[in-house]
Amino acid sequence: MDNWEWAEGFEPRFGLIGFDYKTKERAVRDSAKHAGAREVYLVSEPIAAAIGTDLPVNEPCGNMIIDIGGGTTEVAIISLSHIVEHNSIRVGGDEMDSAIINYLRKKYNLYIGEQTAEHIKIQIGSAYPLEKELSMKVKGRNLVTGFPVTVEVKSEEIRDALSETIMTIIDAVKWLLESTAPELAADIADNGIVLTGGACQTRGLDQKLRDTTDLPVNIVNNPLTSVVLGSGKILDNLNYYAPVLMKS
């Protein structure tokens, strides 16, 4: 991992970048070279995440991964070192935070910041009914009086606030499954769906997907770092992972 950590004043030998399909390859390569990298290798973000979670991306079977990040959700089916089917939507953890902010503004005339919204999402946010519902006190500013106030918010309310965003992600998954070849769909039915990315830790999201798709859904042990770990593995063994790299 020494080549991955670019210290100040250090000229890197090469660098590897997790790549979003909608980003222009040339712009990404130029940016990395301007930063000092002599060689640049591009890899799609879903493949980096899959490698970071130890999925057998080089094998001739279908593996489905959902990477729910801050700004985007990447849904991909990977086989033989390539992405066979892919869907990317600009919905993720940031959109969930915005949904909570808007909900509290409309219901309680309460204005809160993004950090408070994220804290609420982590503490009591959920995508599926909980065995024991939660609540917490939220401090913010009343939009009518302008004074600081404290409101008690329940997990059922936050689940309602997040429902539209969650359904957008689920619809993206359903669309991809419906457009998948039958052979790959059979593999996914056996192997299940892998969830990664920080926002995948929303309570009950895996259960919500199970109920919707009727497929096994598993959250990885390292959802926050799977892309970085996958990038590191590729750098450590470039020859083995050469097929997953994007061609110039």
Image (cartoon, rainbow, N blue to C red):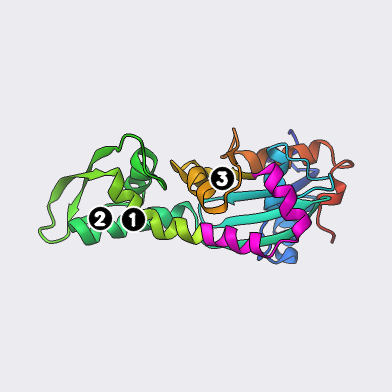
Q: Give the image location of residue 153, x and y in percent.
A: 23, 45
Q: Is residue 186 magenta?
A: yes
Q: Quadrant of residue 181?
A: bottom right
Q: Give the image location of residue 86, x and y in percent.
A: 68, 61
15 is higher (above) or lower (below) than 175? above
Q: Earlier in the sequence, mark 1 or mark 2?
A: 2
Q: Which mark is residue 197?
A: 3
Q: Which residue is mark 1?
A: 161
Q: Is residue 213 visible?
A: yes
Would you say the magenta stretch is mainly helix, strand or loop?
helix
Give the amino acid at mark 2.
Answer: Leu
- Check contact, mark 1 vs mark 2: CB within 8 A: yes
Q: Quadrant of residue 111?
A: bottom left
Q: Quadrant of residue 190?
A: top right
Horizontal side, residue 76 vs residue 113: left or right: right
Give the amino acid at mark 3.
Answer: Gly
Between the residue at mark 1 and the residue at mark 2, the CA separation in whole angstroms equals 9 Å
Q: Quadrant of the C terminus?
A: bottom right
- Check contact, mark 2 vs mark 3: CB within 8 A: no
Q: Earlier in the sequence, mark 1 or mark 3?
A: 1
Which of labels 1 and 2 is toward the front?
1
Which residue lies at the image location 35% right of the left edge and 50% below the top edge?
159
Which of labels 1 and 3 is toward the front?
1
Q: Is residue 22 magenta?
A: no
Which residue lies at the image location 25% right of the left edge and 44% below the top edge?
154
Secondary structure of residue under mark 3: loop
67 is higher (above) or lower (below) than 90? above
Query: What range is drawn magenta here?
Result: 170-192
Q: Which residue is mark 2?
A: 104
Front residue of 164 and 33 = 164
